[in-house]
Structures are given as C-alpha cells and as structure tokens.
Amino acid sequence: MKLPWVWAPNATRVELVTASQRNNLEPQAEGIFTAITPALESETDYAFQLDGTGPLPDPRSRWQPNGVHGFSRLFDSKFDWSDQSFRACPLSAGVFYELHVGTFSTDGTFDGVIPRLPHLSALGITHVELMPVAEFPGKHGWGYDGVSLFAAHSGYGGPRALKRLVDACHAQGLAVILDVVHNHFGPDGNYLPQFGPYLTDSFHTPWGAALNLDGPQSGPVRRFLIDSALQWLEEFHFDGLRLDAVHALFDRTARHYLRQLAEEVAVLSDRLARPLVLIAESDLNDPRLIRSREAGGFGLDAQWNDDFHHALHVALTNERHGIYQDFSGLADLARAFEKGLVYDGRFSRFRQREHGMPLEDLSFRRLLVFLQNHDQIGNRARGERIGHLIPASRAKLGAALTLLGPFVPLIFQGEEWNASAPFQYFADHVDPELGQKVSEGRRREFSHGGWAEVEVPDPQARETFEASRLDFDEIGRPEHAEMLSFYRHLIRLRRERAELSAPRLSVRFDERSGFFALDRGESVVAVNFGRDTLRVPLSREENVRPGELLCATAGAAIEGNTLVLPRDSLIVATLVRS
C-alpha cells in the first residue's frame, strides 16, 4: 500500500483520482501535496487533477499500461532476482552491444530479447546497452521522446518484463547499460509543465525546451531526474547508464548536475557493493566530463567518441558532407588513435570555431568507439548501415580497427553479421497532427541535401519500423555467417591477446597508397584502404620478424618479412624480436 504524493507548485488544489474515488491531497511545504488517506493498493490505476484540470498521469509513475496519456498504475516492485553473484566486467575490458528492443526480435519486447542473449554471449559481448525504454508515445519508436522517466515502456512489456530481461542478461554474464534522456522531454504526453517549472525559457535544445537545472525551483527538477537514474540502477539492477547528449544539459550552478549525479551514483554503488558506471554522449570533446572530481572534473566513467567514428567513416567511404567535412584521410584516423580525440582544440570548419580540449593524461579506456551506432545509421536519410555503403571486405577493415584498438568498442545490433535491415528513423505518435509534422520535418530536413521526398522513409509509417527489424535467419546464409565468424574471431583475439586492447601503440600510414597499421607491441594490425595490392615491410626494426598469423582477409599474406595486402584486406600477426 502507498500514500501518493506529487510535487505541483503550480497548483493550488490537487486531487487523487481513481476509478472509484476522488480525494483531495494535503498541501505540504515547497509545493508538495500528499494523500493522508486512503492508501492505494498495488495495481490500482490512479491520476492527479490539478485545479480542475486532468486527470493527468503521475510525473513519477512507475507504470503506464495505457501509454503516456493514460492513468498511472501503482507498481509492486517485488521481484525474485537470481543475480546475487553477478558482477559486471570492468569497463576497461568491455565490448559493448547497442540494442533497440523494438527491432531486435520478432516480438519487439523485453521478453523477446531473452532468447537471443546466448548469441551475444557467444559473440564475446560483455555489456548490453539498451536504447531508451522510459515510456514514450505509441507502441514503437527510438525512445528519445520519453515523458515518463520512471516507467518502463508498456509497449515493450512494462516493468516486470524489463526486470526479467536484466536478470536474464546477468545469468548470461552480460552487464546491462540503460540509455537515459535527461536533456529534454518528448512533445507528446508531456504533462510535467502543468505540475511545475520542469522546463526553462533560458535555454533551448534541438529537440525542444531545455530542462530547468539551474533556475528558480530547479532543485526538485534535479531531484526528479536523479531519483529516476537511481531507480534504474537500484531497483532494476542496471549496471550503468548512458547519458544522452549531455551537451544539452544547461547548468550554471557551481555543482553541475552531472557532478551531482556522479556523486550520488558513487554513493549508491558503495551501498550496493557493486560497480555502477556513467557514460556520456557529448558533442563537446571536453575531458572534464571524465576527469575525476578530485581533479576538478565531473567524475563520469567514460564518454562516446564521435571523432573516431567520423575519421574512420571518411577513411572507409570518402563521404565529406556535414560533420564529415572536418575529417580528411588517414592522418585524422591516425590522430584519433594517437590522441584519442581528433578535435582537441583544432579549428573546426563545420563549427567555424576551435573545438575540444586535449585528453592529456586520461586513459583511452574511457572512450567508447564504434564503426556504427543508432545515430550514425538512423540519422542518414534512408538509415543505411556501413554494409550498404561499402563492400563487406572493406567494412571488415573498420571492424578490425574498432575492435583491436586501445578504446572500449561498441557494436550496433546486427553489425556482427552485416545485417541487411537498415535502421531508419521511426515513430508512432498518437497525435495525428504531431505525427504529420514529424513526417514533414524529416523530409524537409533531407530535401536540403538533394533527397527527393519519396526517397525519405516516412517515420510514422508502420513499414519504416518493420523494415528496421533484424532478421536473425540471415545468420545461416554464407555471406552473413562468414562476417559473424570474423567478428567472433576479432573479439576473441582482443580478449586473448592483451596487447590488442592495450593503450600502447604506434601508427604507421601512407596517405597515397592507403596503407595503415597499428603496431601493438607484440602484434601488428595492418590494413589496405587503397586500390592496389601493397607490399610493405613488416616493421622498420631490422630485428623483427613475423610470428603467428592471427587473422587475414581477402588474400592477405606474409611473404618473408613483407606484408602482402590486396585491396580492402587486413592482416593481424604477432611479432618476434630477435
């Protein structure tokens, strides 16, 4: 049983509404209203009425079985967990797998993911990262327009099903990271401004009004967000959070919101006696995010590294539009490996200003890198994967450099077998007018890039969502099975050969021929981005000769002390020093 409460400083009268009764809540200090009696039984549907307006869902609703506009349901948090002995793999040794629940299985549910977990374990994955699951409009979508930040999406099966998924992941030895959005709310079903000043006019994000993190009455807003984060970690047993677009968290206070979040998560981690991690997505290239609090940073554990992706993507595809105009050739790819960030104070043509700061002493193990992710695929007009843009033999070069580098690698669902399905932008807004605006806006966005409207999939069309669903039956086809075997082999090499994931490396490359190599101490990773077969001495050092050939593609070989690399091929080999 529970006595409901709500923070509603904008209201003078708040009523608790159920199917059978309506009761006034008592005003308390600082805008809080609390029910004195009666308490609600578990599974009861309820809502709030504010000064006669409503009924409205509970801002802290744990369950929205009828979607973002429906009544909230009181959720019994009891669950028979079986993961008491599970401990997450250290972040520095991790291999991440980004997963979208709605398109990962035929069912498109939390329970539908569970039968596929052995596939991820066999691949060598250590961390499963779920795209956002907080309640969002409709049955399917990317999840970045959530409005009920405490409620697991009902279209995926709701809170109990999410707990079953996390428990099953832990049983397979897989840590689970949840993608959370604290920088904006979705436009459909967002009733929070009717309760209080959750939003601010002082700042704006590309997706709508920014959250009030530093203005009047911002304390309860920060508390709302942090309590949501702590809930996922404690009650749902997540092992960490990926924080979406932290550059859109505007906070001028001395104790930045991210620092406060990191401090409270650290306290929770100590209390639970298990590691909990926070990973930022940021457009700032600002090392303060991952610098320790003792050294003046925010104390997050890691951040996504878009610079690596962009440099690698340009090397593979030679695309130069948009943000890619800032990246040119193999020199920037080498810079990513050597410095971690390509833009660490350099002038950016795309931004028309200097961008970023050097990592200095920070470990590269605090950077997550990727050949593909949901943004880099889905924000293309037609949602093309790398395998739609270049031959599979060339995509392997990108996979090898991502998986055998000094960073923490992330794989996007289906990448491991070169899945045929695109990952397009899709939504299911129940408001027809909003849905039409989203569809028109998407087409207008890409029309400036020369795309005809008919070439841009309609986000609101069911077939756009269905086209993005993975087909696991592809794994049985020779070309897909071969790619899956390749990924498994690379991940196994990363795990078994310590030097292939170690921070130490040096880079050799030749822009004209397309040769690029990572010298990894006892091993070398060499690739040919060029058009012609290359014959390259194994090492500059006279006392180095080839040892074991660990991996070779497309006819690549070692002849004497020379690497023979046909077009779009790679070699991974050990080195013997005499």
Image (tube, rainbow, N blue to C red):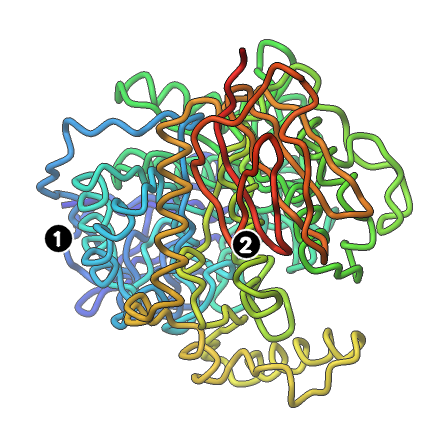
Is residue 9 toward the left or the right of residue 488 in the image? right
Q: Which numbered tag is attached to residue 41?
A: 1
Seen in the picture, residue 126 relative to 18 is either above or below; the reply is above
Front-most of residues 212 and 532: 532
Q: Residues within 10 Å of mark 2 (few under 14, many from 20)?
A: many
Seen in the picture, residue 150 relative to 470 is either above or below; the reply is above
Can you name the residue that lies furthest to the bottom here? 454
**Cβ atoms at labels 2 and 1 below 8 Å apart:** no
Can you name the residue that lies furthest to the front here? 560
- Residue 106 percent location from the top left of the image: 27, 72
Say which of marks 2 and 1 sits in front. Answer: 2
For the C terminus, give its image quadrant. top right
Front-most of residues 322 and 146: 322
Q: Which residue type carries mark 1?
A: Glu
Q: Residues within 10 Å of mark 1 (few under 14, many from 20)?
A: some
Residue ID for mark 2: 372
Q: CA distance from mark 2 to mark 1?
A: 46 Å
Q: Which residue type carries mark 2?
A: Gln
- Residue 81 percent location from the top left of the image: 12, 39
Front-most of residues 566 and 85: 566
- Residue 110 percent location from the top left of the image: 25, 59
Q: What residue sits 61% from the left and 44% below the top? A: 564
Q: What residue sits 45% from the left and 47% below the top? A: 179
Q: What residue sits 32% from the left and 55% below the top? A: 152
For the N terminus, give its image quadrant. top left
- Residue 510 percent location from the top left of the image: 78, 40
Seen in the picture, residue 442 relative to 397 is either above or below; the reply is below
Q: Report if residue 327 is visible in the image.
A: no
Q: Which numbered tag is attached to residue 515?
A: none
Res. 257 image quadrant = top right
